[in-house]
Amino acid sequence: MSKMTFQNQQILDEKRSQARFGGGAQRILQQHQKGKLTARERIEVLLDPDSFQETGMFVEHRCDNFGMRDKKFAGDGVVTGHGTINGRLIFVYSQDFTVFGGSLGEYHAKKICNLIDAALEVGAPVIGINDSGGARIQEGVDSLGGYGELFHRNTLASGVIPQITLVMGPCAGGAVYSPALTDFIFMVKGSSYMFVTGPDVIKTVTGEEVTQEKLGGARMHNTQSGVADLAFKNDVELLLETRRFINFLPLSNRDVLPLRPTSDPADRVDMSLNTLVPTNPNKSYDMKELIQRIVDEGDFFELQPDYAKNIIIGFGYMEGSPVGFVANQPLHLAGCLDINASRKAARFVRFCDAFSIPLVTLVDVPGFLPGIEQETSGIIKHGAKLLYAYAEATVPKITVITRKAYGGAYIVMNSKHLRGDNNYAWINSEIAVMGAEGAAEVIFRQECKDPDRKKEIIANYKETITSPFVAASRGYLDDIIKPQNTRWRICKSLKYLRTKSVNKPWKKHDNLPL
Ligand code: HXC
């Protein structure tokens, strides 16, 4: 090696190690003192060892305002590149809070946009790690423009590649709209927050006093607003669970579904399911138990577990192939559909449909939640979201009614009428406009004043109206099944539906009820 080449290589090595040092030792220490990993440490935990290939390591800003000319950091506050998770290609960007507080300037934004462009061309997910003070104040409109470009990329990529945002620090102002445009948001309890306007602005404008944590912390977004999908106790837990999560997703809408070898027999019968539903119709049971009993190895990855608990959403594998589950949860609000449940499930159904992940819907629903608050808040439009999502979905769609399916909610929950491919009901289930008692009171008000006659009417109603054999006789159910056989019936359906393909009328795009 010539002396010149050797010197140049030394310069390169020095520049690299300087870039890896971000904002310097003191700021790295401060990051650690807050219980947070650095941008690069996060990438290390997230990706397979030694798989990360960095791009744009030497990119710098070109801002001269406020002495910025002398403050340049290689990489401009965001680490970008690609690597693998369990051997599968992933693009990742990680904002570096030690450099200008991770704030987004023109070139910082360009790096992220280039990354999304590359991910779109190649067809691989983007995982964005957000830890930023927002728009870089010194760069003014260039920084706003950067956000605009990023939002546009997020929108173009939506439905083409999975986009996951890990909010692991501040995320405030308009900056929140990039995560909001992506498919899933995971947050860290205690060290991350998201809000459009912070506590100080709120105090000035409305006089309300609130802490950052209460206004936009992980707990709030995972229980009240529904903005986030999961909350974790620290950085490492979040990153390791993200690795597990990505296993359920295809790399793009052009990719085949990831397969996972399983030793769990597809024809496994589970006798305990025959007693899952209590004989007393007013008693509840845990629908999650059913999901865990039918998926491969009991491995269910639930999303939004603490928001709109009356509906369950998440991923599992069935006979080695991923499936999206949507299920009413009788333990909460008796499994009624309300505004939040409809929005939660609708978005999930649309994600699964966009990425060709089959849907399994487990139904025990007494109807839409009655109430002035629900009506005045627009349950009509919000409920229509779930209806719309199921109706437009063309992936394999399997439904199992476990106990009751009443009223409009029966139709919404992937009924035959919305082109459910295989609709099953457990032997003791009931399907009708409403439950037997309510129906008897409406159509036989006078006669029901006599308790014996009322009993008779209810028994008759159950036999002639709500029995699953009535729905099956019309072809609205494909079969009535024993609970014990649920897993293998679903597996068989999913197997023959693998090559399902549906032609829909041409349209520029749809107009779902937003
Ligand atoms: C430039 C920033 C910055 C920003 C932080 N820094 N935010 N530099 N632009 N937006 C710098 C700080 O000057 C500081 O630099 C370093 O990052 C660390 O910040 P600290 O304040 O010391 O950290 P901390 O106490 O942890 O507080 C973090 C913070 C706070 C809460 C994020 O920095 C903050 O409030 N920043 C401003 C947030 C904001 O208003 N952003 C604009 C939002 S509006 P030194 O050199 O001193 O270490 C927006 C619009 C987007 O983003 C619109 C899109 C359409």
Image (spheres, rainbow, N blue to C red):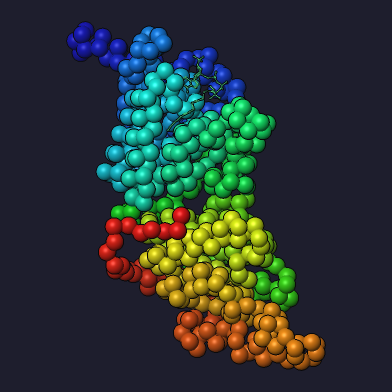
- What residue is rendered at 55% in x and 32% in y? 197
**Which of the 4 image quarters holds residue 203?**
top right
Q: Is residue 209 above or below residue 274?
A: above
**Residue 75, x across and y down, in percent:** 36, 22
- Is 34 on the left or on the right of 176, as rendered? right
Q: Is residue 190 above or below residue 323?
A: above
- What residue is rendered at 56% in x and 48% in y? 226
Q: Is residue 288 above or below residue 246?
A: below
- What residue is rendered at 27% in x and 64% in y? 506
Q: Is residue 178 above or below residue 373?
A: above
- What residue is rendered at 51% in x and 60% in y? 381
**Which of the 4 image quarters holds residue 401?**
bottom right
- Is 63 on the left or on the right of 179, as rendered? left
Q: Residue furthest left?
A: 2
| Residue in the foreground of this view, choosing between 98 and 381 | 381
**Residue 115, x across and y down, in percent:** 32, 35
The quadrant of the rendering that contains the N terminus is: top left
Answer yes or no: is residue 261 visible: no
| Residue in the foreground of this view, choosing between 216 and 501 | 216
**Residue 310, x across and y down, in percent:** 62, 60
Answer yes or no: is residue 333 visible: yes
**Residue 513, x across and y down, in percent:** 45, 58
